[in-house]
Image (cartoon, rainbow, N blue to C red):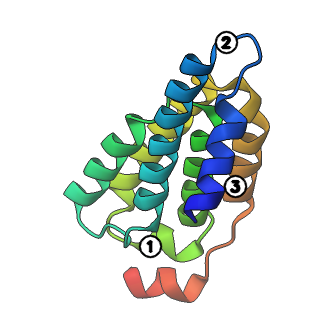
Amino acid sequence: MRKYSFILAYATSYRDNDSNDENKKRLKQYSEAIQIASKLCKQSNPVSIQGFVTLGKQFEEHLESNSVICAGILKYLYGYLTDPNYYITPSVSVSTPIFSYLIRKIILLHPFLRNEVFTLLKHCFLLEPALDAIATVI
């Protein structure tokens, strides 16, 4: 995995007009950010309110770094928000505003990811949760 994160960091950090020192500094910065974001996405799913708040804050720290990391965060959110079982969990009232805030920040900071966000939201609206699962909650 490190090999792929290095290649991804190199591809996003290298600029022809910058000096080698600037490119190396940016490469190190992006590589660390990609590895941290990757670790956050691989963590076990938070089950507590505090877990979602902490995860949201950790993701927010990396939103401004580059669009590749934000694309990974969107993929992570896509896994949650397109799962029909997510909407019947007790933590949905806490995690959904956090996810919405992250999505809003991504749209504002990285306009090229707007199509991905639109696709995510479209899938959320077209989602049909199982009625049996909802009936057990009620």
> Of circles 3 and 2, which is in front?
2
Which residue is identified by label 3? 125
Give the Cα separation between the discs numbered 3 and 2.
44 Å
Q: Residue at x 49, y 70 (%)?
A: 86
Residue 67 vertical position relative to residue 127 in the rendered view, above or below: above
Residue 111 vertical position relative to residue 49 in the rendered view, above or below: above
Residue 126 vertical position relative to residue 96 in the rendered view, above or below: below
Q: Residues within 10 Å of mark 2 (few under 14, many from 20)?
A: few
Hey, which quadrant is residue 108 in on the image?
A: top right
Instruction: Estimate the x, y position of residue 50 in percent, counting from the top left.
Output: 20, 55
Mark 1 or mark 2: whose residue is earlier in sequence: 2
> Of circles 1 and 2, which is in front?
2
Badge 1 marks a residue whose secondary structure is helix
**Type of amino acid at the residue the image marks with label 2:** Asp
Give the Cα separation between the discs numbered 1 and 2.
50 Å
**Type of amino acid at the residue the image marks with label 3:** Phe
Mark 3 or mark 1: whose residue is earlier in sequence: 1
Which residue is identified by label 1? 88
Give the Cα separation between the discs numbered 3 and 1.
15 Å
Q: For this rendering, which residue is in front, 65 or 124?
A: 65
Q: Residues within 10 Å of mark 3 (few under 14, many from 20)?
A: few
Which residue is identified by label 2? 18
Q: For this rendering, which residue is in front, 41 or 117?
A: 41
Q: Residue at x 59, y 71 (%)?
A: 83
In the rendered structure, the answer to whether residue 117 lies left or right of residue 42 reads right
